[in-house]
Image (cartoon, coloured by chain):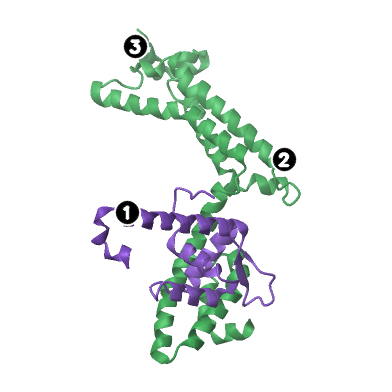
Amino acid sequence: MKRSMNLIPQIPFSILLALSLKPRHGYEIMQQVADDSLGKIKLGPGSLYTAIKQLCDDGLIEEVAPEDSRRRRYRLTSAGWARLSAELEYFDNTLKLARKRPQHQQLRWVTT
Amino acid sequence: MKDLKRRFPLYSLFLGLFPKEYRIRYEDEMLQVTADMLDAAPDAPARALIWLKLFVDVPAGIIAQQLNVATGPLTQQTPRYIMLASMLSSLLLLPFFVILAINTTDQLVFGHSLYNSWLWHMPQLGIWVLQLPLAALIIAAVCYVAYVLAGPDRGKLHWWQRATDVRRAWPVILPILVGCGVLFLFFFHDSVHCWTHVPTYMFTHLSSEVRCTQISG
């Protein structure tokens, strides 16, 4: 899948990344997002479910057969996998490009 | 869920501000996530900090979802033919407003009154104030009637419910109103006798007729 012009916004991207490991319910997603971002992204229920609703509407994630209405678990759809892969590939290519440039030594974040 | 609502009565009321559909779908989960967050907090200051964050985070979600509900049907649920008819009607109505702007500029710069302006005389007048708005009105009205009689949710809603469904049909209702307004202006403006030459009108609007005759002369 080719990456579209717009990047997925940070929070939906983080949720897709969190769900790439296994299906999770809301609180698990929040924890995984916080871990993945080294504590920089701390979601609240409002922003979490706004993003989840949007991702569901876009067909990027779906609900796993519900067992408990309080702890619904979500997983990536095939479209979600494709979108996440495209985003990660784009980031990977961007990093490779940055490393090839002569000034890359000055960009400490690239080499660490 | 009732136990969580009892645990967070104020917060539950707060969640009631989300749109109904969203609330039905996510309220239980949001309460549970909130309970999980608070249960995981090690002490009272940490819990206080969580509540503080919630009362910033949740209103932002409420605003986002309410906006989504308010604007979503305007673009997402409106049938495509209504959007197309709306665009076409708007294009046909556009010359009226463009000419009106030109006319105003003409009046400001050269001091031409509405009657003196060449834009206010037939046959030009007929194009931008009669034919194009009439075409826009017909297109929008036909589309609106088609939506009311054979809308996509025919089985679910009565025709009168679709007729009053402004949130979906506004793209054609608006051109209908504007078109009617322009035609009303056209037929009831006191310059109408300048081109209709209806004897009774000329007789009842003598002063206007004199002015019109002076201009023509």
Residue at coordinates 54% horizontally, 57% vertically from top-left?
A: B69
* Chain containing the residue with disc 2: B
Residue nearest the viewer, comparing B51 with B126: B51
Amino acid type, mark 3: Gln
Q: Is residue A39 left or right of residue B156?
A: left
The label shown at residue A100 is: 1
Residue nearest the viewer, comparing B40 with B16: B40
Give the SS element for disc 1.
Answer: helix
Q: Position of residue A38 (x, y in %)?
A: 39, 75
Amino acid type, mark 1: Lys
Q: Position of residue B68 (x, y in %)?
A: 52, 57
Mark 2 closeness class: few <14, some 14–19, many ≥20 residues within 10 Å:
few
The label shown at residue B150 is: 2
Q: In this rendering, is residue A39 above or below B153?
A: below
Q: CA distance from mark 2 to mark 1?
A: 61 Å
Q: Nearer the viewer, mark 2 or mark 1?
A: 1
Residue B174 appears in the figure: yes
Mark 1 closeness class: few <14, some 14–19, many ≥20 residues within 10 Å:
few
Residue at coordinates 45% horizontally, 25% vertically from top-left?
A: B189
Residues at marks 2 and 1 touching, judged by CB atoms closer than 8 Å: no
* Chain containing the residue with disc 3: B
* Chain containing the residue with disc 1: A
The residue identified by callout 3 is B214
Give the SS element for disc 2.
Answer: helix
Colour seen for chain B? green
Residue B204 appears in the figure: no
Q: Is residue B139 left or right of residue A109?
A: right
Amino acid type, mark 2: Ala
